[in-house]
Amino acid sequence: NLQGSNIQKVLFNDSSLKETKFGATHIENCNFTNADLSDAIFKYSNLSKTVMLQAVLNHTNFIGSTLEQIVFEGVIENCAFENCSYSKITFQNAKIMNTFFKGGRLKRITFKNCQVDRLTYEFLKNGKADLTGVTIMK
């Protein structure tokens, strides 16, 4: 439980952070490469200048959080991005499945070489995301 923490310049590479609750947490200049964030919850948190390359995002929830200057890469499955604010967010070389995007300005998200399932595609389309760089998985 890292609620209310101020975390800066920490390497969480290859760490297991399953079911961790990041409530009202400020996270800046951190690296979560290959970290397992399954069932983690980021609620009303600020994540800035953070790397999420090949992080395990499965049933991970971002609720009412501010996300800026983050690169997501890898498999993102059964996740929720709900009422978040986005600035300079990039999903690249990502497979995004059964992931819920609600609220927030999805136009501020860049997708590069991403594959999504039909359900995720519809959430992104309804949120008016720029779907350049997105293909639907068959």
Image (tube, rainbow, N blue to C red):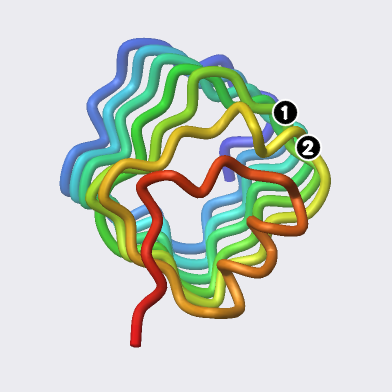
Residue 110 location in percent, x, y? 45, 33
Side of 15 where 3 appears, left or right:
right
Considering only order in the chain, which callout, 1 or 2, is on the residue closer to the N terminus? 1
Q: Amino acid at mark 1?
A: Ser
Disc 1: which residue: 85
Which residue is found at the position 54% from the left and 24% from the top?
Answer: 47
Q: On screen, 12 above or below 67?
A: below
Closer-to-camera residue (128/119): 128
* Quadrant where the C terminus is found in the figure: bottom left
Q: Which mark is residue 104?
A: 2
Residue 101 location in percent, x, y? 69, 56
Q: Residues within 10 Å of mark 2 (few under 14, many from 20)?
A: some
Which residue is found at the position 16% from the left and 48% from the top?
Answer: 14
* Quadrant where the N terminus is found in the figure: top right
- Dot 1 falls on a residue whose secondary structure is strand
Which residue is found at the position 65% from the left and 47% from the top?
Answer: 62
Residue 104 location in percent, x, y? 78, 37
Which residue is found at the position 75% from the left and 50% from the top?
Answer: 127
Q: Residue furthest bottom?
A: 138
- Dot 2 falls on a residue whose secondary structure is loop
Please say whether residue 25 is visible from this viewpoint.
no
User: Quick check: marks 2 and 1 in contact, CB under 8 Å?
Assistant: yes
Q: Amino acid at mark 2?
A: Gly
